Amino acid sequence: MRSRAVQLALAAVALAAVIAAAFFVNASEQHIATARTSERAFDAVVRETTNSVAEFRSDGVKKSMDALRSMATTDKAKASVDQAASKADNFTEIAAVLDQISTARTAEQQAADDTEASQRKAEATALGGAAVIGLVAITGILLAVPKTAAQASPAAEPATDVKTEPEKATGYITARPAGPVLRAASQLCTDLGRVSDVEELRGLVGRAAELMDASGLIVWMSAPDGNQLVPALSHGYGTDMMSRLPPLARSADNAAATAYRTSQLQIVLARPGASNGAIVAPVLSPDGCVGVISAEIRGGGETSESVQAIAAIFAAQLAAVLHTTPESHEKRAATGT
């Protein structure tokens, strides 16, 4: 009874953490949208002001300057608008007026960029915290299950039978204690929340593969049009092999494409003497599935609930790092990144 109560409490904590993170991310996205809307409105008035100055329309210039002053959100932008207004009484300093207006516009754009960057960082922290709490809760629930089963077993049944039955059912037994694995997974989630470059992220992918006892792991990301998956990062596979991997069509008949379409974790069972099993977990963002991770698991471990849980949590944490939206695709295409 006590174990059951612990399981319910851990499940409630994990659910509360996920809900809190979801509410925070939603509020953060609304804040970013508001900042971007204000920036676009300010930019529109800047263009109107520039046209009024170029056409020597003094009444239009005054109205536009008043509008810019009321819409400015930064001290630098307000100061630049005031300087432009002081020089716009006559049209002998048009270049200086336009320069000050451009400075105000740049200040507002930088403020919107800083707001978005700050909110994205806070979102990543919130998602990372929720992932760590979820990992702790899931691991605690999994550890409590065998204890409950042992208490319910008949006293006359030999202990060896209780131990050997799971071995036959799953074909996978981990020799690693749960404590160190949990600590390593928690540290991995924390490091993912602070990753700053691709090489560091590549190392974290390798650590995730080790935690899942995977001989190889590939991170597939969606193409800009959303119709294909392309390999982005890997561990355990040679460079030549990765260079020959073609993109996967969204409609393909395989576990990776299925996980991408359905946003559901997929299990590929091992074929003894032929191939290892695999786990494919979707990488989910607020905009939907943006990729998948596919892990080739040794020794039948794809049927282990703990291995499946680690794969799902790693994919959830990875979404905060590789969050992709249509707007970011356009920016990447414009900059060639």
Image (cartoon, grey):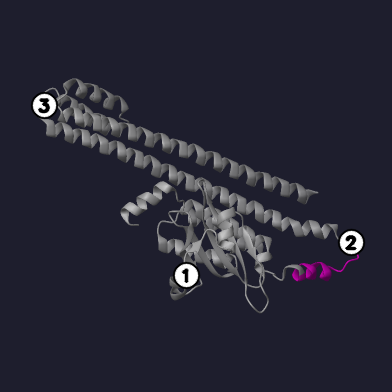
Which residue occupies 15% across, 28% down?
A: 55
Decide: is 202 above or below 21: below
Left or right: 300 in relation to 100 = right
Question: In this view, which residue lies farthest toward the right?
Answer: 156
Which residue occupies 8% across, 28% down?
A: 92
Q: Amino acid at mark 1?
A: Leu
- Point out which mark residue 245 bears: 1
Q: Which residue is mark 3?
A: 91
In-front residue for pair 188/264? 264
Snapshot quadrant of residue 258: bottom right
In-front residue for pair 129/24? 24
Pinpoint residue 230: horizontal percent, then vertical percent: 46, 62
Mark 2 vs mark 1: in front: 1
Task: Kindly state the secondary structure of the residue where label 3 is placed.
Answer: loop
- Magenta segment includes 175: no
Q: Which residue is mark 2?
A: 154
